[in-house]
Image: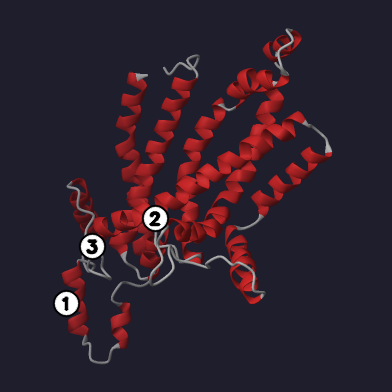
Amino acid sequence: MTKYIFRRLLGMPPLILGITIVTFLLIHLTPGSPVDNLTLNPEIKPEDLESIKKTLGIGRPLHEQYWSWITQMLQGDMGISLKTYQPVREQIFERLPNTLLLTTSALVLALAVALPIGILAALNRNSFIDNLIRVFATLGISIPVFWLGLMLIIIFAVTFKEWGLPSLPSGGTRTLPNGGDLPDRIRHLILPVITLSLAQLAGWTRYIRSQMLEVIRQDYVRTAQAKGLQERVVMTTHALRNAILPLITLIGLTLPNLFGGSVIVEAIFSWPGIGSLALDAAGNRDYTVVMGTVFFISVVTVLSNLLADICYGIADPRVQYS
């Protein structure tokens, strides 16, 4: 295991470096620059624009810009935002708690709902309940995130308020100016968490159902049933423990997806997280912020995959890493 972890850690820097190079080229090949809006000001002269570009460092060749950025990154400096002139690292870590709160809540909700529903569907195979759960799972995977978020806002934030029913906030993390206590934060979390978790919930439900159906056909499960053990004990102690082992890897691979999906969800619900920061930066051609967020999410993705493999090896001693 130690040698495997060491090899994976050695492979991380080239992978992340390749991701940053591709992202850097794509960003700079996109038409426009952070100073384009200044051209609308009639008082700005062409020589002033060139001076601003030189000061911001965006007038140099691409390889020089990338080398300057990567050397700063290796020193722990993500650079300065070309729009707000604030350190990129401070902006990311300022919004990181909001993104972690959103993604962690979505992960917990998806897992808490998918486990019992998936087991229920497997134990009632081809019944009405099983068919209903499979239809729900298919719809959950098929519904676009942005459409679901907008529908939830229209129904629970707008329509309910018009009807005089208890409504939910349509965006933000707290009610201004005096909100921010625990019940208020939970109310603001409900809609974005449901939106972000539905696709994962539906996918995990189908996965757990298929894993349970495979496990309950195994000889050791039938042997436990033949010994006269209670069905609940057989399912929880023998079947479920082996069925959810592959789910550990699946959860590790899902964490980056939740970070990526939070970009859309945060934009819809005005949630001040890393996703909305990256989206705003892309719209403003703020290269340094986009690169900083891509670098951060890339590191999270690689570490999540490594952590999932380690946890799987710990949970199942039969797994051998060569």
Q: Which residue occupies the foreground of this view, 68 or 130?
A: 130
Residue 160, horizontal then vertical, whole percent:
64, 70
Please report the residue visible at 21 percent of the width from the left and 87 percent of the height from the top: 45
Mark 1 or mark 3: whose residue is earlier in sequence: 1
Crowding near the residue tagged with mark 2, few <14, some 14–19, many ≥20 C-alpha atoms within 10 Å:
some
Crowding near the residue tagged with mark 3, few <14, some 14–19, many ≥20 C-alpha atoms within 10 Å:
few
The residues tagged by marks 1 and 3 sit, at their Cα atoms, a distance apart of 16 Å
Q: Quadrant of residue 231?
A: top right
Q: Which residue is mark 1?
A: 51
Q: Which residue occupies the foreground of this view, 210 or 99?
A: 99
The residues tagged by marks 1 and 2 sit, at their Cα atoms, a distance apart of 37 Å
Q: Which residue occupies the foreground of this view, 131 or 264?
A: 131
At mark 3, the secondary structure is loop
Relative to residue 12, is residue 278 depicted above or below?
below
Mark 1 or mark 2: whose residue is earlier in sequence: 1
Amino acid type of the residue tagged 2 in the rendering: Asn
How many numbered discs?
A: 3
Residue 61's disc number: 3
* Rendered image coloring scheme: secondary structure
Task: Say whether residue 82 is left or right of residue 245.
Answer: left
Q: Which residue is mark 2?
A: 98
Please report the residue visible at 21 percent of the width from the left and 65 percent of the height from the top: 60
